[in-house]
Amino acid sequence: MRIAVLGAGALGCAIGGTLAQAGNEVVLINRNPAQVEAIERHGLLMRTPTGEQTVRASAVTQAQGLAPVELVIVLVKSFHTREAMSAATDLVGPGTVVLSLQNGLGHEDLLAEIVGREQVLAGKTYVGGVMLAPGRISASTTGKETLIGELDGQISPRARRIADTFTRAGLATTVSDNIMGTIWDKLLINVATGAVSAITRLGYGPLYRIPELEATAVAAVQEAMDVARASGVRLGYSDPRAAWLKAAAGLPDDFKTSMLQSLEKGSITEIDFINGAVVRWGRRCGVPTPVNATLVACIKGIEAALAH
């Protein structure tokens, strides 16, 4: 399969490199010249629990001028989605599928505005990747599930074909008839801890020892569940506290959420696609979301302070 990975950072390279190693024709797109040069010159070095492999894959800093592919996997940061996809339309032909594997909610709508809703699939992956140096990553793929699906819940031949391609490469992938429910279930986890951790600058150990923070987090999750149900989404959770507990399961006390890590690096966060998405969907269906709105406001304030 001819595949482009739009946003070939650590996770994009873990997925793209695994697909390339299985014989697919993969192009890795990353705007960092050092990353692209290292991959083009030396190949992509992937460290896995079974050892290190060097994978040959094409790498470029921009998609303009490239021929259309069969599959575009979108893994850019949420706030770069519109800009990145708008600059990558050369990759999209009449039969191209555009698959978002990003965290959060709302990417599908942005992608649909650019390429058409009929060409968009949604997904969620638990594959992991860590950037070691330009062109060098640590990849965690074994036993890590990926789920993909049509936005309308249909089990389509194209979704099956993509899942088969992923699975043959070693990326265990399932086609879901409720992919939006799957995305919302993961969103609940992010809603539970991302903003409260980032605002307080606390890792999971101290975060989970403060009852007032737990109460705030559970209230935010409850709002998100109310919004999802009012929107006709089938959730896997019935108790908001279960999402709060699941978020920390198996993680060390010093674990930091990606939102907190972003602020510590002086970067903006993906708040608009996590708690912000709950607020937007709440407005659409008439469900109040004051807790999530407050968390969004606090993060926006911190981002503004960092910018100055």
Image (cartoon, grey):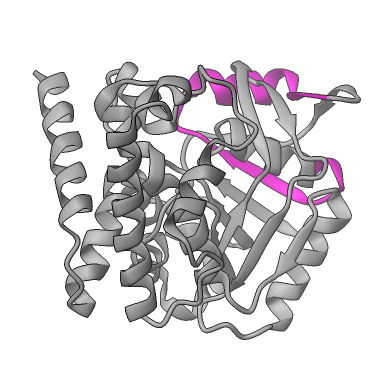
In this rendering, is residue 12 above or below 209? below
Specify whether 215 is left or right of 141.
Answer: left
Residue 108 lies in the magenta stretch: no
Q: Looking at this view, is 287 or 214 the one in front?
A: 214
Q: 15 left or right of 200?
A: right
Task: Please name the residue shown 49% across and 81% down the image.
Answer: 118
Q: Position of residue 135 (x, y in %)?
A: 65, 21
Left of 153 or right of it: where is 290?
A: left
> Which one is nearer the viewer's eye here, 47 or 212?
212
Quadrant, the N terminus: bottom right
- Residue 160, visible in the rendered structure: yes
Whether residue 82 can be seen here = no
Residue positioned most to the front: 211
Q: Residue at x 37, y 48 (%)?
A: 191
Query: Quick one: 96 or 233, which is closer to the camera?
Result: 233
- Start and end of the magenta stretch? 20-48
- Image spot of residue 279 (x, y percent): 22, 60
**Residue 280: x percent and y percent?**
22, 64
Is 23 magenta? The answer is: yes
The image position of residue 78, as x and y in percent, is 37, 46
The C terminus sits in image quarter: top left
Residue 114 appears in which quarter of the rendering?
bottom left
Residue 11 versus residue 244 in the image, above or below: above
Residue occupying image coordinates x 26% and y 69%? 281
Q: Is residue 219 left or right of residue 239?
A: left
On screen, residue 242 above or below 48: below
Residue at 64% across / 65% down in the picture?
148
As drawn, the residue found furthest toward the right would be: 50
Count the labels in the image: 0
Which residue is outermost to the top? Answer: 133
- Occupied quadrant, residue 42: top right
